[in-house]
Image: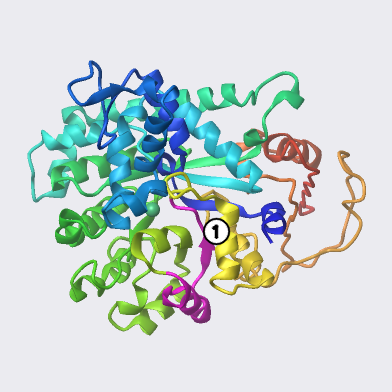
Amino acid sequence: MYGFLRSMPKGSDLHNHLTGAVYAESFVRFAVANNLCADRKTLNLTAAPCKEGQVEAKQALSDPVLYRDMLANWSMLGWPMSGKSAHDHFFDTFLKFDKAVPGHYGEMLAEVAQRNAEANVQYLELMLSPDEFTSIGFGMKSAWNDDFGKMRTAMLDGGLRDIIAQTRKNLDQWEASRDEILRCHSSNKSLAEPGCAVKMRYIFQILRGFPREAVFAQLITAFESAAQDHRLVALNLVMPEDAYIPMTDFRLHMRMISYLKEIYPNVHITLHAGELAPGLVPPDGLRFHIRESIEMGKAERIGHGVDAMYEDDPQALLAEMARRDVMVEICLTSNDQILGVKGKSHPLASYLKAGVPVSISTDDEGVARSEMTREYMKAVYEQDLDYLTLKKMVRTGIEHAFLPGPSLWQDGRHERPIVYRGIVGSSMRTIRPFTLRLADEWTFLIHSDGISARADIAAVGIREPWEPEPLALAVLEQYGRQHDDALALVAMRRR
Ligand SMILES: [Zn+2]
């Protein structure tokens, strides 16, 4: 089963936190490189010089017990022995290894690209903080104003524009470092690592556990950066949804997003919502997060949505999600580990029954010690999904990715692709113009596993008047996967 699922093309992973996607073994290397000290008991990292009770991180390379303890404390490996709930152990890992992260974004992106190439995943939307959290510090020093418009202007004029400019530079640098590690631009194409073929876009994550000024400053930075940089396709709220500020400021956060979405209508929104379970919060805390994230927060996708059946009028909610085409990013390992929700208690079957679009994501494959193929294993073994349902979820993920371009399916529900048999496909790597008589209502689905993403015709760099051959070549060169055959079909209307 694992071998079969591993080789199956999985399309996208749309819910993947970059720092959570990195395995603890890498954080040990980063901690050594950053010259950090580790508390011998908690394994929290701090800057040198080491104090009483701390050891140099580099000792882990020659001390197997220290090394083992780092892996245990910086991932779910050590949870059973931690004396904490899985939820708390999970979220605490991020606070323990966070000082190892600076300076290593390129390596992190490369690691995640390689792992997903191995799992036959073609496209990632990674959650990260391209401002390296500077907008949080900026917001903490800013004054609150109930008038969002005035506060936005004051923040932009007060220094936020510099932070926004820096996010683009950071992304440039991190991507260049990734490409160098993976040898993506090597003149000898055979030296390029498979990870080069995994296309990446980014989601600006807002740490919602901070005071309202800091959340607002992050949101402006996220919206403004995404409006300026096509690599940043969306934003999301992160950190435990059940914590004090995320629970008490929930509606305030939704109002902020609703306000800013009016100003930046082209920036996409996906929100963690309903990553909750009975007992984790009081019952009334389970009743409205998914619905309000969609209606007030304008979420086009929902992360987790685990407590859906505890919301008010759950069937109406599911029907609304199906009608609005709001997709749920399903994270089975994470929900099992953090919330203890799995098998029949998971709402996946209800979502499928109600026709709510769903696709499979990893959430935090590094901290969880998982990976995409094992998410699919869980979907088969614990959720009883058959092959066609899995394939449909793969298509749903591609359809709900925040890439530009029109839908690939006739009805938006991935059930009626149009196939024209024969004629093309038998002769690869050649340009073959031909003429067909078409009816007006025909739509083309260009279906090829060799094309790595939905091609954006405006971005291929070919000016009008468009000719079929240069367009096909540009699509093949820019979007064709290096390790696969590809088909680009250009259909043009005769004038
Ligand atoms: Zn998440």
Q: Position of residue 62 (x, y in %)?
A: 44, 22
Q: Is residue 440 above or below residue 37?
A: below
Mark 1 burial class by Cα count in 10 Å: few <14, some 14-19, many 20+: many
In the rendered view, does 291 fall on the left or right side of 60? Answer: left
At mark 1, the secondary structure is: helix
Q: Position of residue 71 (x, y in %)?
A: 41, 38
Q: Which of 224 and 333 is in front in this view?
A: 333
**Res 223 seen here:** no
Toward the viewer: 101 or 46?
46
Judge whether residue 485 can be spotted in this image.
yes
State the residue at coordinates (51%, 69%): 357
Span shown in magenta:
342-363
Q: Which residue lies furthest to the top in this view?
A: 49
Q: Nearer the viewer, residue 35 or 463?
A: 35
Percent across and percent down for residue 140 are: 13, 37
Residue holding disc 1:
375
Is 423 contained in the magenta span?
no
Q: Which of 377 and 357 is in front in this view?
A: 377
- Quadrant location of the N terminus? bottom right
Residue found at x 58% / y 21%: 180
- Residue at horizontal 77 percent and vertical 36 percent from the top: 473
Q: What residue type is labelled 1?
A: Glu
Residue at left offset 72%, top offset 59%: 445
Q: Is residue 346 shown in magenta?
A: yes
